[in-house]
Amino acid sequence: MDYFEVDILIAKFLDNEATEEEQSFLLQWIQVPENKAYLEEYVRTEIWIKYSLNATQVEKQLSTLSIYPERSKGRRFSPMVLAAVFMLFLGLGSFLYLFLSPESVQKWNTNTLILEIRDSGTSRYFSLENHVGLPKALEFMTLVKDSLLRYDTPESQSKKTLDNVYHTVHVPYGKTFKVQLSDGSLVQLNAGSKLTYPYRFDGFDLREVSLSGEAYFDVASNGIPFHVLTDGLSTKVLGTSFNVSAYRDESLREVVLVEGKVEVSTNTNTPLHKNSKTMVPNQRAILTAGDKNLSIATIDTKNYVAWTKGELVFSNAGINEIIKKLERKFNVDILNRYDKLSVQRFNGRFKDETFTEILETIKAHTNFSYSREGNTIIILEP
């Protein structure tokens, strides 16, 4: 089960809609320290945007996994209450853990663009591959050529009936997608990314969205700050164009500013260690895992936003970076079993080439061989 499937399973679990088999799988899955850390990052970066209006349910569900997050704005959960709920669940969890097989967990089609709609504590899922099945009740939402989801909200509509509706667009590997938010801001999502945002921004004093993965933002200026939350970084603007990259399986977090002015700060539970910097165009803010300080560098932004034009750019890139970009763009799995490639650097620019053509181009300049088994490519010694 990949991270796309896991994210959907976590959402179902927090909605208290997961089956016993799915709960069992999640209990087993977090026994691996890396997986538990992934869940904790999920909690830190986006959970309170999507679930702030149903916090009691979230507290209960997370406690069953022995995850005790801290709410924003300094509000903490009651450890005694959470511990009691966790102990109450422990017997059932142990039974499921011992007797149910993770292979029986519901499988999701990870190649499909998905819209998740969370309304009053309940999530529903719809395919964005076509118009069939999209909720007619949410008018002013249009799917354009299966590549753009546009929100057209009239000024006369009251926010009161929609203030607890949040949407999440899940973009699988091998695809990109655009969302035009209700304020007119345009967001282009790269492969393997997801964006969570309110159905409406009316009445909010802050336009806040949550991102996992990579996206290019063209923010509409309306006098209300626009805030992008990711794991490790937050970016606050009024109206500008910038790129944010924050994949959960990468240690690097970055913001690249094309136009305008933004304030970038680290996300931390300890305000004393919070680091904030103001960026101007043609700058790149970088945060590396384990580092509390932001670094700013002047760069040429073209290579960093080339993906929005369908281009794949490698600039002094290592093989691990290349593998991740190829996996996302072409929805393949690549295993590198030739250690000598790890010390080499590569440069290249591709647009309409196929996966095989790109791999053969790299191979022509570097001595290695490869084999293919279904959707898995294995890089080997020559």
Image: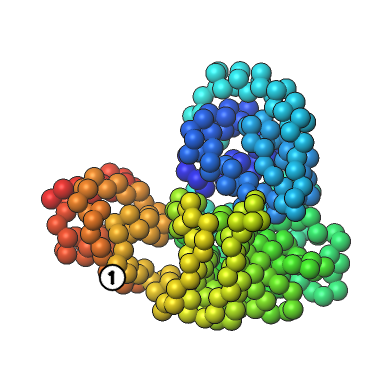
Decide if residue 61 is on the left or right side of residue 362.
right
Disc count in the image? Answer: 1
Q: Position of residue 140 (x, y in %)?
A: 74, 68
Decide if residue 293 is on the left or right side of residue 326.
right
Asked if residue 379 can be seen in this view, the reply is: yes
Point 17% across, 64% down: residue: 365
Crowding around mark 1 (Cα neighbors within 10 Å: few <14, some 14 to 19, many 20+) is: few
Point 49% across, 29% down: residue: 103
Residue at label 1? Answer: 348
Amino acid under label 1? Answer: Gly
Q: Position of residue 98 (x, y in %)?
A: 55, 18
Q: Is residue 180 above or below residue 359?
A: below
Q: Position of residue 105 (x, y in %)?
A: 54, 32
Asked if residue 192 can be seen in this view, the reply is: no
Which residue is nearer to you in this view: 337 or 261? Answer: 261
Q: Position of residue 32 (x, y in %)?
A: 48, 33
Point 72% across, 40% down: residue: 58
Point 49% across, 55% down: residue: 291
Which residue is nearer to you in this view: 318 or 193? Answer: 318
Quadrant of the image occupied by residue 67: top right
Which residue is nearer to you in this view: 83 or 366? Answer: 83
Question: For numbered disc 1, what is the local secondary structure?
Answer: strand
